[in-house]
Image (cartoon, rainbow, N blue to C red):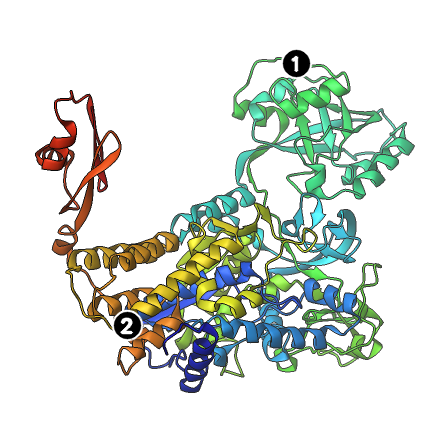
Amino acid sequence: MTNYNPQEIEQKWAKVWERKKAWQVDLKKAKKPYYNLMMFPYPSAEGLHVGNVYAFTGSDIHGRFERMRGNDVFEPMGFDSFGIHSENFAIKMGTHPKAQTAKNITHFTEQLKQLGSLFDWSRAVTTSEPEYYKWTQWLFLQLYKKGLAYKAKAPVDWCPSCKTVLADEQVIDGKCERCSSQVMQKELEQWFFRITKYADKLLKNLEKIDWSERTKIAQRNWIGRSEGATLKFSIFVPPGHLPQGDKLQIEVFTTRPDTLFGATYMVLAPEHELVEKLKSQIKNWGEVQKYQEEAKQKSELERTELTKEKTGVELRGVKAVNPATKEQIPVFIADYVLASYGTGAIMAVPAHDERDREFAQNFKLPVNNAPLVSVEEAIKKSGGEKKTNYHLRDWLISRQRYWGPPIPIIYCKKCGTVPVPEKDLPVKLPEVKEFRPTGTGKSPLASVSSFVNTKCPKCKGKAERETDVSDTFLDSAWYFFRYPCTEFKNKPFDNARIKKWLPVNMYIGGQEHAVLHLLYTRFITMALKDMGFVAFDEPFRKFRAHGLITKEGAKMSKSKGNVVNPDEYFVKYGADTVRMYLMFLGPFSEGGDWSDKGIVGIYRFLNRVFELAASKIEAKNDLAALRNKTIKKVTEDLENLRYNTAIASLMEYLNEMKDGGKKHIETLLILLAPFAPYVTEELWHELGNKDSVHAQPWPTYDAKQVGKQRIRLILQVNGKVRDILEVPSTISETEATALAFKSRNIQRWIGGNKVKRTVFVPGKLVNIVV
């Protein structure tokens, strides 16, 4: 082949690799197992976008690099196909989620195969297949048996558009992460996982795992451990207004118990249970009730936004007693206090807290600059105790939707709540015509009598199934366990296989999942260890967060019309060019801005590589030092996912290799192979090699040779080039300046002029100013 034709080359080698099953690893016989994983996608109808390609390419380059270093790299791929995103699109298109998802997966698979990645398709998983969600339901049952799954009534974030509850982490700036609708509060009975039981361990283990620091910071902040104390304030009620012996108290959690003397008012969450108990005492009940309804229309994030104006209503007729001063102080309700955090009540100390001071100014409340007391004294005076509190709350997993795994629970009037026996799994999702969300707080499955009505596994009497489905984040919280164990039909994972291949060696994904998916995977792994199913408590040895690809400085979105579809660029320039261009945009951890002009430069680079390799010119110069330097630089950059600078080094190598000969061309192809797998395979065989370039051992470098590299040192007089010398790359300023003044050309241009100063740019030039 004389011209670079990416389409022809890529189609040819894709068929060869698929026929040879080139990327399949024998998981049983592998001697150096290396599990390289990327976050699997949900199969949207739009197909792959460049953000997907960016993440998958960065992960695949790492996998290919480790493979060439002698590791048996397992790089699977699958589809996170259950959930609101797939269901909403099916509703929009007027199709059934099952049919729409299958169609999307077919399209996605075709696109993914174009990428030239190491994906082992023989072990693909699809979370909406019964063979997979059978084990998602099994996982729920194990957590239920262990007391880590429970049902409770609680105020929850509700999306009026998606018509379902959302976990805290799925609410962004007060809006649904999926559809951007304003979220509101609703009280429903829901299923939860006790992730809070693992709060300390989730926090402590962050010290021992090799993860992106920004991801660890996000998790620390989300877990939000704070030490303080609970203090108790009595409610003042006139004699005869409460049943005899009934004593009401407000319990608060504070990190500053030493400010107790300065507490001048109390604030309860609008939904605090005491408000209803004090109804007969509250003189402005209508105003209080109106405020409670307004608070329900806001998400928790919206309510706690620091910059929002602090609003509230005083409970007139109700007073609390400061246990330190014995003074009666007013009690308010305000939406910035949440019933689900701490005790749902705070003591307000405007002298020591900016938020309390702002509220006090709005309501003309006193500020008491009382002296601080010891923590022990404050606790003693109030009858409280030391306590640790967390921002983290239990994981809400119920969803009132159709497209998800049914929660495997049965309700019997005689036996109560009964888990579905494991032998009866999976509880299959029935295929129904009407699957739209109802908005009533119940799943569409509640109206499917053939699904709801069943027999109790214990007494065999009439019973009903749970009709909520589980959160899609439960599907993805364990998928990495299933990939290496897909052939095991009677268990979710095999102990010997898991022991050999997990924890995952490298996991790459988006930072936006720091407090969602990544926190849930850690919790599930810890729980599985405690239940004796696995021997480790962290799922990923390494995690690296990738950056974001933008267009003209803005995040890509359909509404802005700036989404880049990679398909047209695959056709025009080839997958190799797209892969390399994305990696060259900037540091992998930061991302970069897509430009149609920029991609042309990478295409030209690959054309130059093709032309040089095809020419088969013999060596005329010695590039040993540059070769060793390039191997060293590219190796170190790949180890640290610095793909853009590795590519820059390869470009520099090519620039000096105009007639470098076969040895250097082969080195270039091996170093380039992880980035551009198709063209390097083609050229490797064009050079007469029989085996694959991807089967070659990664080249090593001679440290002594690295220092011997020679460079061209430019000599200038008043900024104009007057001579060029070839010198060692390690030349010092003193040595370079001395050589410059010895140059006959430089001496001629200086003449009898006085030298004012010299400027030395390491590795580039000496400029003499006269």
Where residue 579 sits: x, y (%)?
45, 63
Structural crowding at the residue carrying mark 2, measured as other residues with C-alpha within 10 Å and reported as few (<14), some (14–19) or many (≥20): few
Q: Nearer the viewer, residue 583 or 520?
A: 583
Residue linked to disc 1: 368
- x, y percentage for residue 708? 13, 51
The three-letter code of the residue at mark 1 reads Asn
Q: What residue is disc 2 on?
A: 615
Q: Which mark is residue 53?
A: none
What's the residue type where badge 2 is placed? Ser
**426 or 721: nearer the eye?**
721
Q: Residue at x 49, y 66 (%)?
A: 573
Location of residue 402 with respect to 386 vertically, above or below: below
Mark 2 element type: helix
- Return the x and y of residue 524 as percentages of the image width and height: 53, 62
Q: Is residue 749 visible?
A: yes
Q: Report helix, strand or loop for mark 1.
A: loop
Is the Cβ of the residue at disc 2 closer than 8 Å to that at disc 1? Answer: no
How far apart, in angstroms, are the residues tagged by discs 2 and 1? Answer: 86 Å
Q: Name the front one of labels 2 and 1.
A: 2
Mark nearer the N terminus (2 vs 1): 1
Q: Quadrant of the image for the N terminus?
A: bottom left
